[in-house]
Structure formats: C-alpha cells, structure tokens
Image: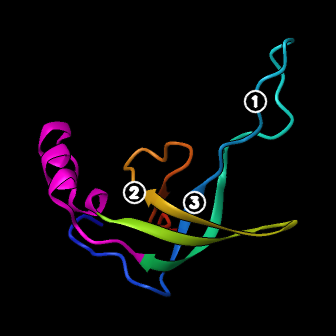
Amino acid sequence: MVGQKPSVGRTVHFVSHGTPFRPDGSQEFTSECRAAVITEVGPETESNLQLAEVEHWDEEALHLVGLCVLNPTGVFFKQGVRWHPNNRAGTWHYPERV
C-alpha cells in the first residue's frame, strides 16, 4: 500500500511488543498484530525526511501516528508510532488483504 497517507479514523494493525523473555527462554505473551484506530497523524518533519533518505523509508514511515489499540482485555493509547514494512514490534501497518 505504498503511497497512501494515514488518516484519523483509519483502522490499522499495531504490532504488540510481547512480554520479555524469561531466563528459561519462554515468553508469556508473544508479539502479535492488534487492531488499532489512528487517532492523530503527526507532521512530516525535516529530521524525518533526512532519516527517511538515509534509511530508504517508504512514504508511510514519515508519519508518526497516535493509536487507540484494541486488545482482548482492554484498550490503550500510544503516541508517536512509526509505520514499518516488516511488522516490527511497536510499529503499525495496514491490514493484510485476505
């Protein structure tokens, strides 16, 4: 979905962080996609534009968004979330087509 700009009210996915690994290597909760609604869209900044050029970001990565993340056990709000094409923990992306 390259070329789209995020907008308030749009449904996207937030990739949860999961819980830290225990000493035995197990993890209570893994990182996974959660439904989220964009609540704010931050402006493109000069520093974002420079970093985008260095790191070869797509246009979506220029925009930091605020999200209302919908979890099975409740909701939480997160600001300054960056788009990432490979679904890295702590980032957002457009839902995959099914």
Residue assigned mark 2: 83
Question: Observer-nearest residue: 70 or 32?
Answer: 70
Q: Are marks 3 and 1 in contact (CB under 8 Å)?
A: no
Lower sequence index among marks 2 and 1: 1
Give me the residue at 38% from left, 83% from top: 7
Specify the label residue 20 is tagged with: 1
Give me the residue at 65% from left, 43% from top: 17
Residue most toward the front?
A: 46
Question: Observer-nearest residue: 88 or 8?
Answer: 8
In the image, 9: left or right of 55?
Answer: right
Q: Please state which amino acid type lies under the numbered disc 1.
A: Pro
CA gap, disc 2 to disc 1? 22 Å
Lower sequence index among marks 3 and 1: 3
- Expressed as whole percent of the image width and height from the top left, the position of residue 28 reads 87, 35
Residue assigned mark 3: 14
Image vertical order of residue 42 relative to residue 7, above or below? above
Q: Quadrant of the N terminus?
A: bottom left
**Which is the main secondary structure of the residues drawn in magenta?**
helix
In the image, 83: left or right of 76?
Answer: left
In the image, 82: left or right of 24?
Answer: left
Q: Which residues are magenta?
A: 41-62
